[in-house]
Image (tube, rainbow, N blue to C red):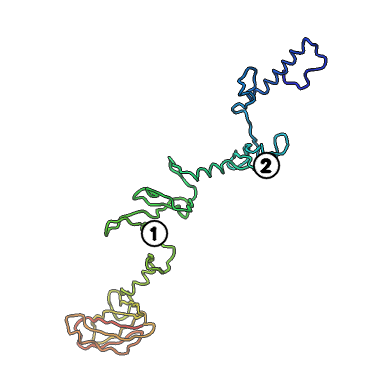
């Protein structure tokens, strides 16, 4: 039978009364014994104690606002559990931390405890996104293995790209940071500090101060033309070679001096008296004319301007 609060019924004959009372008590014992230790002859210290797995927590999509019976939560309810069946991630476990009510995910405490304690990971930890470290971690054996590049995700987000590794300095065989050959700086702006790495554009812009560049001057051959460079003080030097083909001629600069010409000198290339310079005239920022009777070899010339 099932527990019946209406028993003992009116009019039960006296001989049947005890049996009816015992049967109803047995039904009550069966009901309570399903989730608690509540059985005749059971251990006294366990009577009324919940069995393992007997307690049930809330399992629903919305946060419980009241007790199961509809009454308000009280301080004695703190610690109740609720499984959010519609959370992300699904089935989040929450604990009642205030009777307002306030449900706090258990994971908050778990994560806080994990982050506050020293821990050791037995396997590789993979991050879907780049980790942000507020303080430098203590890495006793480096971030990556020796002779291995530290990698980053590429711009297309479909592969990893080598960034930097530890290499050996050929001059003194010391450990140094090494980047791949195709590494680049963020822009082509000129470095502003002595220890900055110069980019290719900066180097190209300043090579002319120490190296002659072809200038394609008509009337002169020196490789593919004349050579030109700008010094640090702003002076420009142009030079070239004139193949002998007469006692006079004209040199026209492929690019005229922007401001003007200060001097031009010509002499022979062979083992001759270099003190015998050719005469120059009609000198301008765009070129000059020359004359050297009885020239016996090719002629070098050099012009300085600004």
Which is more toward the observer, 251 or 154?
154
Determine the residue positioned at 61% across, 39% down: 95
Q: Nearer the viewer, mark 2 or mark 1?
A: 2
Determine the residue positioned at 31% across, 76% down: 227
The picture places residue 202, in percent across and down from the top left corner, at 38, 69
The picture places residue 257, in percent across and down from the top left corner, at 36, 82
- Based on the displayed image, in which of its 4 quarters is residue 277 positioned? bottom left
Which is more toward the observer, 214 or 120?
120
Q: Is residue 234 above or below residue 117?
A: below
Which is more toward the observer, 142 or 242?
142
Determine the residue positioned at 39% across, 82% down: 258
Left of 301 or right of it: where is 41? right
Q: Quadrant of the C terminus?
A: bottom left
The picture places residue 8, in percent across and down from the top left corner, at 78, 18
- Based on the displayed image, in which of its 4 quarters is residue 211 positioned? bottom left
Q: Residues within 10 Å of mark 1 (few under 14, many from 20)?
A: few
Determine the residue positioned at 60% across, 28% down: 53
The residue positioned farthest toward the top in the image shown: 15
The picture places residue 280, in percent across and down from the top left corner, at 28, 88
Q: Which residue is mark 2?
A: 99
Tag 1, which secondary structure? loop
* Labels in figure, total: 2
Q: Residues within 10 Å of mark 2 (few under 14, many from 20)?
A: some
Q: Earlier in the sequence, mark 2 or mark 1?
A: 2
Q: Quadrant of the N terminus?
A: top right
Q: Name the mark on residue 183.
A: 1
Left of 240 or right of it: where is 150? right
Tag 2, which secondary structure? loop
- Based on the displayed image, in which of its 4 quarters is residue 43 positioned? top right
């Amino acid at each position: 039978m099932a527990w019946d609060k209406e028993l003992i019924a009116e009019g039960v004959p006296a001989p049947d009364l005890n049996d009816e009372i015992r049967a109803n008590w047995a039904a009550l014992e069966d009901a309570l014994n399903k989730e608690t230790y509540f059985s005749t002859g059971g251990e006294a210290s366990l009577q009324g104690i919940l069995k393992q797995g007997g307690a049930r927590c809330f399992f629903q999509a919305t946060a419980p606002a009241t007790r199961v019976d509809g009454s308000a939560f009280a301080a004695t309810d703190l610690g109740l559990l609720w499984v959010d069946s519609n959370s992300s991630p699904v089935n989040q476990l929450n604990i009642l931390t205030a009777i307002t009510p306030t449900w706090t995910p258990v994971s908050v405490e778990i994560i806080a405890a994990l982050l506050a304690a020293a821990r050791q990971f037995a396997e590789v930890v993979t991050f879907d996104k780049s980790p942000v470290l507020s303080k430098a971690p203590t890495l006793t054996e480096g971030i990556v293995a020796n002779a291995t590049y530290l990698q980053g995700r590429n711009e297309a987000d479909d592969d990893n790209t080598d960034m930097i590794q530890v290499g050996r300095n050929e001059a003194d065989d010391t450990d140094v940071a090494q980047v791949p050959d195709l590494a680049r700086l963020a822009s082509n702006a000129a470095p502003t500090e002595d220890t900055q790495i110069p980019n290719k554009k900066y180097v190209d812009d300043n090579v002319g101060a120490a190296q002659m560049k072809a200038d394609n001057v008509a009337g002169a051959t020196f490789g593919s033309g004349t050579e030109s460079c700008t010094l640090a003080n702003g002076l420009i030097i142009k030079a070239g070679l004139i193949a002998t083909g007469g006692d006079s001629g004209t040199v026209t600069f492929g690019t005229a001096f922007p401001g003007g010409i200060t001097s031009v000198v010509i002499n022979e290339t062979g083992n001759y008296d270099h003190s015998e310079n050719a005469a120059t005239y009609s000198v301008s920022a765009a070129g000059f004319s020359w004359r050297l009777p009885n020239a016996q070899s090719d002629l070098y010339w050099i012009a300085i301007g600004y």
